[in-house]
Amino acid sequence: MAVLGSYRNWRLETDAARIAWLYADKADSSTNVLSREVLEELYFIIDRITAERPQGLIILSAKSNGFIAGADVKEFTAIQDYDEALELITRGQSILDRIEKLPFPTVAMIHGFCLGGGMELALACRYRVAEDDPRTRLGLPEVRLGIHPGFGGTVRLPPLIGAPLAMDLMLSGRSVEARRAQRMGLVDFAVPQRQLRRAALAMLEEQPLAHRPGFVARMSNAALVRPLLAAFMRKKTAEKAAPAHYPAPFALIDLWAEHGGDRERMMQEEGRSVARLLVGETAQNLVRVFTLQEQLKSLGRGGDFTPRRVHVIGAGVMGGDIAAWCALRGLQVTVQDRNHESLARVMKRAYGLFKKKLKQPRLVRAAMDRLIPDKNGMGLKRADVVIEAIFEDIEAKQGLYREIEPLIRPDALLATNTSSIPLETLSEALARPERLVGVHFFNPVAQMQLVEVVSSPITAPEVAKQAAAFVRRIDRLPLPVKGTPGFLVNRVLMPYLLEAVALESEGVPAAVIDQAATQFGMPMGPILLADTVGLDICLSVAEILAQQLHGSVPERLRELVAAGRLGRKSGQGFYSYKGGKPDKAKLDKEDKIAPEITDRLMFRYFNEAVACLREGVVADADLLDAGMIFGTGFAPFRGGPMHYVEMTGLPHGRQRLEELENVYGERFHPDPAWIGK
Amino acid sequence: MSDKQTRYKGRPVYVVDGARTPQLKSKGTPGPFAASDLAVGAGRPLLLRQPFDPDAFDEVILGCVMPGPDEANIARLVALRLGCDQRIPAWTVQRNCASGMQALDSAFHDIADGRADLVLAGGTEAMSRAPVMFGEAMVAWLAQWSAARDMGARMKALTKLRLAYLAPVIGLLRGLTDPLVGLNMGQTAENLAYRFHLSREQMDAFALESHQRLALAQDQGRLNEIEALYDSKGHVYAADDGLRRDTDMARLGKLKPVFDRKFGMVTAGNSAQVTDGAALLILASEDAVSRHQLPVLGRLLDSQWAGVDPAQMGLGPANAMAPLLQRGGFQVDDIDYWEINEAFAAQVLAVLAALNDESYCREELGWDGAVGKIDHSRLNVDGGGVSLGHPVGASGARIVLHLLHVLQQRNARRGIASLCIGGGQGGAMLVEREV
């Protein structure tokens, strides 16, 4: 090997067979991203390679975690206007174009993640080979940031694998593993690491015809077919995302439908479309959500807490699902319950989860082997993390703590999943009360990314840090919160739910209330959410929070619970359910939702959020937004409740609350913090 | 404890703990657990309660007669599934119905010889999942079929396929038939009944008592070596499910003989059940006991293997147990409790008869007179194969484990566990605990 050039972010070598090897190796980073600097360097490297006239070029990564993760999202936030965005995109496009036009064969040799701009770079190569390993993920997730591929990805992908697969990949933003990528034609070969180099070299030697999709897939790009397919795609996409809230997928469909037949033109329009999206509000807010997520992730870093064994006490739905999730993430888990049948139910649910997530029977069995039903609590003594998830009863929990504290390791993390009992009260039963921390998971555990890490005034900060590290270890997002009633998420959510109940008892149809919320951008309406959580649970949380909530618990909620209408689980709540589905009255598209309804719901939400921030339930507004987005799915394109409040202006919010207070009473009384700083 | 009672000059070997699955009766279809699942089911709770990591074992030895097609060297598979480090070697042993005991004996040797300090050993069997195979003719035809390259060759191959080729070979039935003497195991039991003049009533009475004893043991919670199994469908299996609480002499008497169909006496009711199960024990040297501060359940003192006529394989325990008594200088009454695996009621009764028969003991065992009469009240006190089944690879380990529990529960000192082995062998182990 001869080193041809040493660059800040790349390394270029040629071997005896005159094959050029270009390693992506971004300076001062463990991950490759296509930042402006990295791209500019690439521009000059292409000149250097061209001058060398090699037999072929292999582009690969010097990082262990993957090929290239995509564009540098941080740079997105610095973009000021459309022109600047367009310039950045056009530059990237032209650099990848130069790779495509090289007069010798090129191969992208992929391991680990190959996403976004990284995938587009690979698409500009003539061939792609990928390591067949679960860590290999290929995809174009741009749509999740409110944009779509902009370095020629929308131009190159549909002809390569056919429009249906290509558009699905770009519209969903999902990533695929290597073997699936090979079946799709996204890569030429998916091979184990031991064959990866040989496969890349074979592509250069044999120079097979570049991959082409089958006849039908090719036809899907034809001018006559595109409008039909596009109409279908628009319809499917609209079922998942409103065009007003999420413009990117619709822009992508339009781009392909209009220009899919004209390469040059499509390249230009791709750049313009992305530039427009990039400076739009949705993309800016989704980028914000992305950075919030990174921020939560970083809360679990540092420290040397690396748990291997988890012991969960209480095999109810929450305890069981937490246990199963931990096992899915590779930890050895013992789950303890007095009752054989509860443990059996845990194993059944876990099996369903593992099958869905892991698919391969071998991996499912390994996960089942890691999850150990432990009626006698034998796992307690050696666990690194002990999670108490028994029923919400102070004495039962305290009794349990007294029993287990002498048995567990002194350095074990002791956590409770309580959602309503103050940690100070529970920790009275402990000889070392400072060791108790809350890890508040949300239902369903497998879908809700957020875990509130709850500290009481006496919880040791080191313990809270360990809890956050544990939450990251199982690939969830930790949110540090104060142990005041309802913590953050339930507390902010509850007034909003109760307002929905109040509206319903005033005679507003449940479906209208839910629609008001979903039109605002909530993933699920509050009435349906209450039914899903269970009205009995809502009622008990509401009662616990009654002191914080200005206003009382609506009578209607008590009535339904007393009548045994508990929501989805009992088949009857606000809605009635058939086969788990609510029989909602269909609303006409023309139905206008009175803004008053939306305001009543959302301003109680915002008012409580503002109060939580003032009281310091979370450290800052960003964390509050992160919590509500990842804990409840608060409309991500709005960037979070506090961000929304800031954007619309504090004085406006306060004024609206005062108006509502005048009509509906004290529960709308603006929190003092609305007065502003 | 003194060393004079064992022929092993090596280091003392202790059993420190053990666990088994409930034994699940075959319902005629493949059961919910593969053999390795059963062993993992017993092993996980067993390892969980140890003060040492699974990595502390020097080796893992399992007995299994018919592992599944994906379970070659099943001991290794189980060891890795239990979280033992990949550096820990594991091997599988097969001595037919005594495979589980063979695993214990192999561990016993390795520890006594100083080759190992801590060994996980036992046995597992999923009888309900015994393979069903194609016959040779069908296999030969399949080879021809896959060699056929073109349409013509395929058509030609098709014309040679005979319906009779499709007749399956039932692995379980073949496994339970002696290929040399051409008798199935039930017929060898019929031989013993004939030789020792056993009546159908004696067999059925023995079977009934086996069920009654198991029922009592369950009711009194004495089977605490059992660890519940959970499947992926939400079912829990907490107890041996072959127990028939409703059985009586009349019901047993109505059953038809199954092996010698018309005139025989061995029925499904007085034979061991076809069951799935696993039993694992932890064996340790004195060093390991003190290093990890392990509680001692008992000590393995001696073991013996013996060969007998394959057509009378059920006598194996008599020939294996006698030398243990002789070497230890024991009379029958010096042994507090006995576990003789109940392959067939007739077979256990024949063993008792043989040991109490002067001519048998003189001619077959070389004793001066009868070995003696084993008191039925000290034999299989909590039931046996007839009531709780006989998963062939596991039973040898199960009876040793249960014997140790019986000694502990009754504060007794010495016991012998033994079983007969298809093909004409017997195996026996002498255990002792400090009183």
Image (cartoon, rainbow, N blue to C red):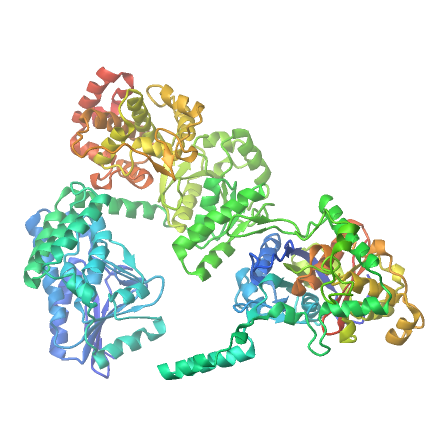
Specify the quadrant that holds the N terminus of chain A: bottom left
Report x, y in % for residue A403. Answer: 59, 38
From this view, report whether residue A660 is shown above or below residue A245: above
Q: Is residue A553 left or right of residue A597?
A: right
The residue at the point 52 percent across, 74 percent down is B163
Q: Nearer the viewer, residue A459 or A58?
A: A58
Residue B109 occupies quadrant: bottom right
Answer yes or no: is residue B383 visible: no
The residue at the point 27 percent across, 16 percent down is A665
Q: Is residue B129 left or right of residue A55?
A: right
Q: Nearer the viewer, residue B232 or B138?
A: B138
Report x, y in % for residue B348. Answer: 80, 63
Report x, y in % for residue A609. Answer: 29, 30
Q: How many marks?
A: 0
Report x, y in % for residue A242. Answer: 19, 42
Residue B288 occupies quadrant: bottom right
The residue at the point 84 percent across, 61 percent down is B199
Specify the quadrant that holds the C terminus of chain A: top left
From this view, report whether residue A373 is shown above or below residue A566: below
Answer yes or no: is residue B366 visible: yes
The residue at the point 90 percent across, 65 percent down is B356
Q: Nearer the viewer, residue A666 or A351?
A: A351
Q: Is residue A266 left or right of residue A357?
A: left
Q: Is residue B252 left or right of residue A462?
A: right
